[in-house]
Structures are given as C-alpha cells and as structure tokens.
Image: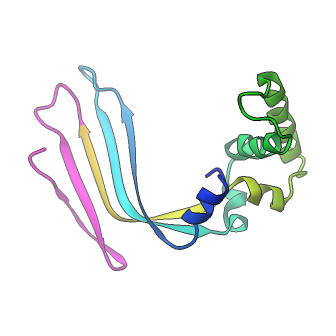
Amino acid sequence: MKNRGHGSDLLFVDDQYMSFLYTFGKYLPGQKVEQWRAQGLCQPIRLQEIISYVQPHTIVEMVASVRANKEGDSRSDMDYSHFVELVQQTRLDLDNDEVSMMELEEAVRGWRFVPIQVERMVGGPDQMMWDRSEWVREGDHWVKPHRLMPF
C-alpha cells in the first residue's frame, strides 16, 4: 500500500483488525456477481521480503508521488503533464534498478492479511437467492465451509 506518513505508521505499530470486500461481475440478466468478504489481522511485513514479487507498475506511481511531494507542489498546483513525466522517469529508474530500497520504503508499505473469517457470495437476477458460503479459521486450521442461509 502507499505509505501515507503518520497514518500508515499507526497502522503498522501492531497487528490491526481489518476487513476487505472484493466484488466482480455484473448484476445483469444472464450474468452473476461474485463478492468476497473477509475479516482478519493485518500484519506489517518488511518490504525487502516481498519487493521481488511486486510488479513494477504497482509501485511506480507511489514512488513518483513521493518524488512530487518533495518538489513542494501541492496536488492542486502540480501540472498534470509534469506528474506524467515524473511517472515515466520513475518507471525508467525502476527498470534500471536506480530506485534505492530507502526510497521504496519511503513510498510503499507492505502488509500481510491473515484472514480469520471469509465469506463468498454469488448471485444474479436470474437466481432465486444468493449462494453464500463461509469459512472460519480456528487456531491454525480452517473449519469446513458451511452455507449461510437464506440470504
């Protein structure tokens, strides 16, 4: 995630309870929507442990944003074309291994989401009702998923 200064620091002090929602599909006749919800702990993780797995396009704008902030312009004052130039230069710098780990850590924070409860819901206008399943973790193992009814 983007490092947002003090707010990010508070998130990474200790494990934090978090939740997320991910939805895809279209709720249209003949189609379905799938929704995943999860609750769990967000644990800080050292960027050095994961940076080799992160796609460069994921972090380019985060690093470019920090570079823009260092120039002193507020977001409203910065010329859009100048920011595009910063993004392009950052992409080149990243491709050429010219972005230091210190600069990456200034722009990006890593975390691991450890779910405790996960729910999957699938449905569409052609279905009588949503198909809902829930997984719950007890200790180090997951309990067999069960169906949530009726909706």
Count the marks. 0
Residue 140: x %, y % from top left? 37, 78
Along the horizontal axis of the image, is 133 left or right of 55?
left
Report the span colored magenta: 123-151
Magenta stretch contains residue 55? no
Residue appearing at x 76%, y 24% in the figure = 80
- Compared to residue 76, the image places residue 134 above or below, namely below
Residue 50: x %, y % from top left? 67, 62
Residue appearing at x 59%, y 57% in the figure = 7
Along the horizontal axis of the image, is 44 left or right of 56?
left
The colour scheme is: rainbow
Q: Quadrant of residue 45?
A: bottom right
Residue appearing at x 77%, y 27% in the figure = 77
Residue 101: x %, y % from top left? 82, 61
Magenta stretch contains residue 146? yes
Q: Nearer the viewer, residue 135 or 60?
A: 60
